[in-house]
Image (tube, rainbow, N blue to C red):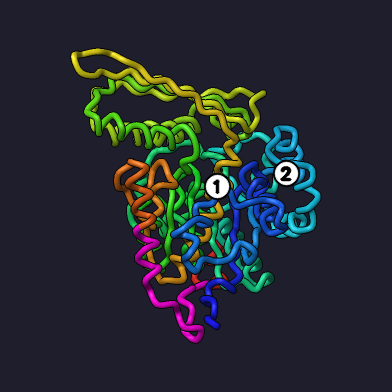
């Protein structure tokens, strides 16, 4: 009888930044529902061939924990999602014990000083965010170390699901790792997403940025990932309107149809919508939504615009309307319109599990730096490349095909995971 690859028996921690938000709530209950056998793994790319044939960590061996800056209870988020017909009461009951265990592994996170006006912020998170950056990093590292030790984890993947941070000008210290660490030692405030990414990568954790926030995208942290031999990916999960755009736009290019205008309008009503109502936060989001379209069409003359409005009554149901005005043969002008209405959180949650499994797989294979094969998951892939969804997804399939022909690791081969328990990270008092 053949023996299953050793990767399948490993316990992998998935640390969610924004652990009580709607996406994380769907991740927690969805994962518990799959493990209980009452949900199918619909929406998980890693549960269909050829990805399903890779020796990825099993869903039943994933352990959830995380940080959040809000004082709200995860069960309150779940109750709201039940009202919106995204979760069900039977699922809540079936998952209760497992989700309670996940809640016990949640800790208070830190908040960007530029985001201190966020609604519902925990005073403890505000206090931590006002402390020197080295102290914030030390707290994050301590929580990650405790999580790994208490749960006897073989690896940890940190996934950023927090609300979009306010856009801010590029800082000179972000260009090089040494300059960035000098800035930390000097107590210069940094975006929370950057501090989480720094803590994760420096401590041997793979890192996934599902948000438009900076995270590991700055050059200094890309340098850190290479130095530490850590895989990372992002940014800004592609789940709705932009996903459709990156499928449709190549069609116009392939048929040599001239797109004259592509006007988009988004309405959303959850916490993300409330935060994006602020102009500084909305600017960070809009940049990625428009860039993918322009990249595919390769025409600077195209009029394109994306609007985002907060509509509280929509809750987690995001509605996007797009109008495409294009020119065909004989100069005939035509149009295409589509409306996308979907639950943002239910669309994103399975992708979070996919990315956590793929990041862990890369970690175990000793892969370092940007995970270029994950571009199809993001509006603004860190590794760059085209935005054509079909081509992006083919890159992922090619990656899977290559690894399916790799010999399985011997059970006696040492793990390449490097996880430190705080060594090398200094608080401000030690700097």
Q: Relative to 104, say whether 410 is above or below.
A: below
* Left-right relation of 392 to 15: left
Residue 399 belongs to magenta span: yes
Q: Residue at x 78, y 53 (%)?
A: 94
Please count the marks in the image.
Answer: 2
Q: Position of residue 322 (x, y in %)?
A: 43, 22
Residue 302, label in figure: none
* Left-right relation of 171 to 7: left
**Distance from label 2 to label 1 (Cα)?**
30 Å
Query: Can you identify the residue that label 1 sits on?
Result: 43
Q: Residue at x 55, y 26 (%)?
A: 319
Query: Can you identify the residue that label 2 sits on?
Result: 71
Question: 413 or 232: nearer the eye?
Answer: 413
Q: Position of residue 189 (x, y in %)?
A: 49, 48
Q: Quadrant of the N terminus?
A: bottom right
Secondary structure found at label 1: loop
Question: 329 or 301: nearer the eye?
Answer: 329
Boundaries of the magenta span: 398-419
């Amino acid at each position: 009888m053949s023996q299953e690859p050793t990767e399948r028996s490993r316990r992998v921690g998935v640390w969610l930044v924004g652990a009580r938000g709607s996406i994380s709530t769907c991740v927690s209950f969805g994962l518990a529902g799959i493990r209980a056998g009452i949900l199918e793994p619909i929406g998980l790319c890693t549960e269909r061939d050829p990805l399903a044939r890779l020796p990825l960590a099993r869903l039943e061996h994933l352990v959830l924990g995380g940080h959040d800056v809000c004082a709200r209870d995860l069960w309150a988020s779940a109750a709201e999602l039940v009202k919106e017909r995204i979760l069900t009461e039977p699922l809540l009951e079936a998952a209760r014990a497992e989700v309670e265990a996940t809640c016990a592994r949640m800790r208070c996170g830190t908040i960007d000083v530029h985001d201190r006006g966020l609604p519902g912020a925990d005073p403890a998170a505000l206090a931590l965010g006002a402390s020197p950056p080295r102290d914030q990093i030390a707290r994050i590292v301590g929580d990650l170390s405790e999580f790994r030790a208490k749960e006897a984890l073989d690896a940890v993947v940190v996934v950023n699901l927090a609300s979009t941070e306010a856009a801010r000008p590029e800082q000179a210290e972000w260009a090089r790792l040494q300059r960035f660490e000098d800035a930390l030692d000097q107590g210069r405030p940094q975006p929370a997403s950057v501090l989480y990414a720094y803590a994760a990568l420096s401590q041997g954790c793979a890192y996934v940025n599902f948000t438009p926030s900076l995270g590991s995208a700055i050059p200094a942290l890309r340098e850190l990932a290479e130095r530490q031999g850590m895989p990372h990916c992002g940014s800004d999960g592609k789940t709705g309107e932009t996903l459709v755009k990156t499928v449709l736009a190549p069609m116009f290019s392939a048929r040599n149809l001239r797109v004259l205008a592509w006007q988009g309008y988004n309405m959303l009503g959850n916490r993300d919508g409330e935060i994006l109502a602020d102009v500084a936060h909305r600017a960070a989001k809009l940049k990625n939504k428009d860039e993918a379209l322009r990249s595919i069409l390769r025409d600077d003359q195209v009029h394109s615009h994306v609007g985002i409005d907060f509509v509280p009554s929509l809750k987690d149901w995001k509605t996007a309307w797009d109008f495409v005005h294009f020119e065909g043969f004989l100069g005939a002008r035509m149009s295409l319109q589509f409306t996308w209405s979907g639950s943002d959180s239910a669309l994103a949650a399975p992708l979070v599990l996919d990315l956590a499994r793929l990041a862990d797989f890369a970690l175990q294979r000793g892969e370092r730096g940007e995970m270029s094969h994950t571009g199809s998951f993001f509006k603004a892939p860190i590794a760059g490349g085209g935005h054509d969804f079909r081509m992006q997804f083919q890159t992922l399939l090619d990656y899977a095909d290559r690894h399916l022909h790799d010999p399985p690791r011997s059970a006696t081969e040492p793990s390449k995971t490097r996880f430190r328990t705080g060594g090398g990270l200094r608080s401000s008092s030690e700097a």
